[in-house]
């Protein structure tokens, strides 16, 4: 879900930046073929580049070469010590957690509604064009089909079909100009451009730049066709009269290239406007450095790796080579009042000169199977809100100082213990397995032992014994909920 939202965000950034560049630098030029190529490249780049791998570490090293890896940071109340997913899957998960989970889902639902609507409009337009082809008389003329519409409708083309109404009032000369205009659209495959933009509009339906770019592409198509049909001054005069005659016509379907006249003033101006200087074509090359710059900057939009979850699920995973090669310089502690620096360093089990492994450091600080981690040291004494942040200070190549900032918080007591999900077993029987009692200090190790004891009773699904702490910081208390699920028969 997050990957989809991140892709849409990165594509939107590409589209916005490149669209603004086109508007400010290129939209007033007369290099129409180059303008068309830029617009198509703009869309393709916006859709493809976010799919390419862009390591976030590249971006951080460009900003600060000394930074090898972001510092480990823990929330005020870490849930790493619980059974995996026991809290997130529980029906009584906190409202804060639920809101964090539901926000991406809500965005995805809204996006899906808009996506479905645009896809429906696209399908309806295709169906109308197909109906016009099937229900009208047509004849093959070389490499295109001429479709004779029985009802009044502006002239337009789609792929290799040219649609001209039998009720039109063209003179023979005007008819030939109109036909030649539409054949330029056919030969240059302008319909494929429009289909690409329509599909992009479906994917990024929310983006305000896309309607502007679609309009610009359609105008460039018309400029190319006008330029091909009216090359000489005398042809331009007659052609301008034809444009004025058709100025009141409505535009046909968005998928069709058409001879409508809503932008007739600009088209007539473009017929006689002096050509842009050839050197201005270099502006179109700006898409290359722009795409490269955004490609590097988009590394900062990558979804960060959850180190804690990866450690808890794969404690024996391989360590990155960069960590294996680094050693610890000094270890400094900040914010600690309960224990001395010397005691904490000894409890951490690391000293100057030892190899530095960020994954192992996170394990020593937040969770270890034997309960020797720093979080257990504090949480077993009632410090429910304990957290420690690690800041890495690069001294020289392959050597790093560690600054460990501790937030101890207040000592918290157990106020109540609730059993949820139990249906058949006497609650007193379950409470006997819980070694921590109301009135005692919060103790993480005892809660883990109680969790394991309940799972070993055999009455409940051992994989679904969850613990949900509900803190009350004002009263320095916490309510503990054990969430149980009956064992499947």
Image (tube, grey):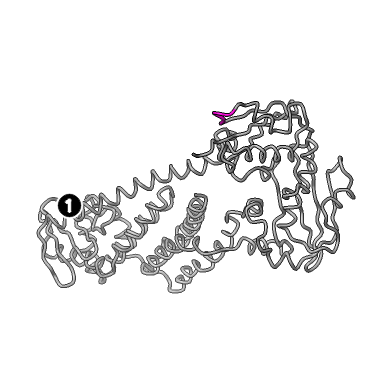
Mark 1 residue element: loop
Q: Where is residue 242 drawn, in percent x and y?
A: 20, 59
Above or below, 271 relative to 205: below
What's the residue at 25%, 70% (across, down)?
187
Residue 30 lies left or right of residue 164; in this view the side is: right
Q: Of 379 and 149, which appears nearest the observer? A: 379
Task: Check residue 475 for magenta coloring.
Answer: no
Q: Where is residue 99 drawn, in percent x and y?
A: 55, 37
What's the residue at 62%, 40% (across, down)?
455
Snapshot quadrant of residue 33: bottom left
Residue 20 lies left or right of residue 141; in this view the side is: right
Count of numbered circles in the view: 1
Q: Of 411 and 110, which appears nearest the observer? A: 411
The 10 Å Cα crowd at callout 1, few under 14, some 14 to 19, many 20 or more, is some
Above or below, 343 relative to 59: above
Residue 235 lies left or right of residue 208; in this view the side is: left
Q: Where is residue 181 drawn, in percent x and y?
A: 22, 65
Q: Of 74 and 181, which appears nearest the observer? A: 74
Q: Which residue is mark 1?
A: 153
What's the residue at 14%, 57% (across, down)?
134
Q: Name the chief secondary structure element in magenta.
A: loop
What's the residue at 83%, 43% (across, down)?
335
Q: Which residues are magenta?
A: 421-425
Q: Where is residue 28 drawn, in percent x and y?
A: 41, 61
């Amino acid at each position: 879900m997050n990957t989809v939202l991140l892709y849409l965000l990165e594509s939107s950034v590409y589209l916005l930046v490149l669209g603004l560049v086109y508007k400010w630098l290129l939209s007033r030029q007369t290099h129409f073929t180059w303008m068309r190529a830029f617009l198509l490249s703009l869309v393709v780049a916006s859709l493809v580049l976010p799919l390419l791998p862009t390591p976030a570490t590249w971006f951080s090293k460009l900003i600060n070469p000394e930074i090898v890896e972001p510092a480990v940071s823990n929330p005020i109340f870490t849930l790493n010590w619980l059974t995996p997913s026991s809290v997130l899957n529980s029906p009584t998960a906190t409202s804060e957690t639920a809101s964090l989970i539901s926000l991406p889902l809500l965005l995805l639902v809204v996006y899906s509604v808009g996506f479905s609507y645009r896809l429906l409009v696209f399908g309806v337009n295709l169906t109308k064009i197909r109906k016009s082809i099937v229900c009208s008389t047509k004849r093959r003329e070389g490499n295109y089909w001429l479709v004779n519409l029985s009802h009044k409708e502006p002239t337009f083309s789609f792929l290799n079909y040219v649609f001209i109404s039998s009720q039109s009032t063209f003179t023979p000369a005007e008819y030939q100009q109109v036909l030649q205009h539409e054949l330029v659209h056919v030969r240059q495959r302008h319909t494929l451009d429009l289909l690409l933009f329509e599909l992009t509009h479906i994917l990024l339906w929310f983006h305000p730049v896309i309607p502007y770019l679609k309009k610009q592409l359609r105008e460039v198509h018309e400029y190319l066709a006008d330029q091909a049909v009216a090359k000489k001054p005398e042809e331009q005069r007659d052609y301008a009269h034809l444009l004025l005659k058709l100025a009141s016509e409505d535009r046909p379907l968005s998928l069709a290239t058409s001879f409508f006249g809503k932008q007739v003033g600009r088209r007539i101006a473009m017929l006689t406007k002096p050509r842009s200087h050839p050197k201005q074509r270099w502006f179109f090359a700006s898409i290359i450095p722009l795409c490269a710059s955004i490609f590097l900057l988009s590394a900062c939009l990558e979804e960060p790796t959850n180190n804690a979850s990866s450690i808890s699920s794969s404690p024996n995973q391989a360590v990155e080579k960069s960590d294996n090669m680094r050693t610890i310089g000094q270890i400094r502690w900040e914010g600690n009042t309960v224990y001395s620096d010397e005691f904490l360093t000894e409890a951490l089990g690391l000293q100057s000169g030892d190899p530095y492994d960020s994954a192992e450091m996170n394990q020593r600080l937040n969770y270890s199977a034997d309960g020797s981690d720093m979080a257990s040291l504090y949480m077993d004494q009632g410090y429910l809100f304990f957290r420690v942040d690690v800041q890495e200070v690069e001294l020289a190549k392959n050597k790093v100082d560690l600054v460990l900032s501790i937030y101890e918080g207040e000592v918290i007591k157990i106020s109540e213990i609730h059993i949820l999900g139990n249906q058949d077993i006497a609650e007193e029987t379950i409470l006997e397995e819980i070694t921590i009692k109301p009135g005692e200090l919060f103790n993480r190790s005892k809660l883990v032992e109680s969790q394991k004891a309940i799972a070993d009773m055999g009455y409940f699904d051992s994989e679904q014994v969850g613990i949900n702490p509900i803190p009350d910081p004002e009263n320095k208390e916490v309510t503990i909920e054990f969430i149980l699920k009956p064992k499947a028969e």
